[in-house]
Image (spheres, rainbow, N blue to C red):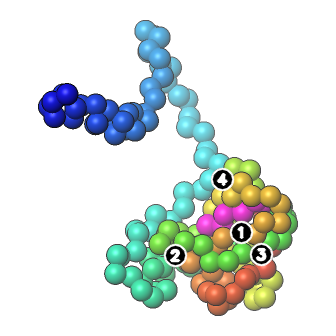
Amino acid sequence: MTPARLLPLLLLPILAGCAQVRLPPHTGAPAPAAAAAPEPAVAPAAIAPAPPRAARTAEQFDTTTPEERAAAAARGTAGGTLLGETVASLGNPAEPGFWLVTPLVASATTGRVVSAATGQAVEVELRPSGGAEGAGSELSLAAIRLLGVPLTDLVVLRVYR
């Protein structure tokens, strides 16, 4: 086979990976107008930018603003239903925002965590880990800093929805 004929065959698997978008089948009828958009299960999280590639310190990796940190801490004081306790370590520091990846939830939702050590609380996005109960959790850099615990500690958290 000539290189000109071989190239499309080599590119086919790459292009197939790009075809992840699925459109609903066309029924011919226009879509009905929505009366009101349903509320999302997860409150809009702070859209912090990704840290710079040259980030080396916690301050450089934590791209949340002082206002976002204050709001997350203030909203973290509300009640809620206790889901349980978990032991959390620092999650991916390059992933911005306030979140907890935990086996205590089956789908993403808004919640709050309270440090057993400091009593500090913060509102976070609770994300399912898919792990077994008791498998432990991962907490975002921004959230762990607001809780006032060392970044290298395993943190005991009470998790609320």
Contact check, label 1 and label 4, Cβ < 8 Å: no
Numbered label attached to residue 108: 4
Q: Quadrant of residue 110?
A: bottom right
Q: Residue furthest front?
A: 1
Please tell me whether residue 83 belongs to the stretch shown in magenta: no
Cα distance in 3D space between marks 1 and 3: 6 Å
Other-residue count near label 1 (Cα within 10 Å), few / some / many at <14 / 14–19 / ≥20: many
Disc 2 designates what residue? 93
Look at the image and give the residue range highlighted in magenta: 99-104
Disc 1 designates what residue? 137
Q: Amino acid at mark 4?
A: Ala
Can residue 143 be seen here? The reply is no
First in sequence, mark 1 or 3: give its number: 3
The secondary structure that dominates the magenta segment is strand
Label 4, secondary structure: give it: loop
Can residue 54 be seen here? The reply is yes
